[in-house]
Image (tube, rainbow, N blue to C red):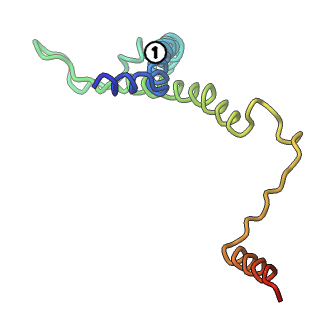
Amino acid sequence: MFKGFKEFILRGNVIDLAVAVVIGTAFTAIVTGLVEGIFNPFIALLFNADDLNGAGITLRPASGEQEAIVLAWGRVISAVIQFLLVATVVYFALIVPMNYLRKNPFGRAKKDEPTVEAEKIPTEQELLTEIRDLLRAQQPK
């Protein structure tokens, strides 16, 4: 039981996943600060709202002990902006470099390397014909 657990923990994928979660959490704090500190005030200014999270349409005002019902579209816009920022940074910081390295390992230019044409792999019919011809050639006449 412990042997299987040890193998699971020592796999590279588990450690990579743990590192990704930690970095993702730290990155989320940066993006949240960017959205709330820079983008939300500009959008709130555009819609003449004090705070983007408070921007919305009041469906029922507060009365007595009942709270107001507000359709808070500002929170949705804030979440969409945050998602787009995270997706953009992940794409340009991780996906583009990994695709480049996958196509071009170690940064070597493909143009500098001589082109080696792959040999044509013979079909099964061609192989059988060649074997037949070799066997005929080995037989005494």
Residue 71 spot, x, y in % from top left = 29, 27
- Quadrant of the snapshot with the C terminus: bottom right
59, 91: nearer the viewer: 91
Q: Is residue 117 left or right of residue 102?
A: right
Q: Can residue 121 be seen here? A: yes
Q: Is residue 128 above or below residue 54?
A: below
Q: Nearer the viewer, residue 26 or 52?
A: 26
Q: Tag 1's secondary structure?
A: helix
Asked if residue 122 is positioned above or below residue 20 in the image, the reply reads below
Residue at 51% x, 12% y is 30
Res 54 quadrant in image: top left
Give the position of the N terminus as an image quadrant.
Answer: top left
Residue farthest toward the left in the current orientation of the protein: 65
List the residue tagged with mark 1.
22
Q: Residue drawn at (51%, 20%), measured in percent from left and top?
A: 46
Q: Position of residue 100 (x, y in %)?
A: 70, 35
Which amino acid lies under the numbered mark 1 shown in the image of this protein? Answer: Val
Q: Viewed as shown, does residue 29 lie left or right of 121? A: left
**Residue 44 place in picture, x, y as percent:** 46, 17
Q: How many marks?
A: 1
Answer with left or right where residue 39 lies relative to residue 10: right
* The furthest residue to the front: 140
Residue lying at 46% horizontally and 12% vertically, measured from the top left:
29
Q: Nearer the viewer, residue 53 or 108?
A: 108
Residue 44 in view, yes or no: no
Res. 107 image quadrant: top right
Q: Position of residue 137 (x, y in %)?
A: 81, 81
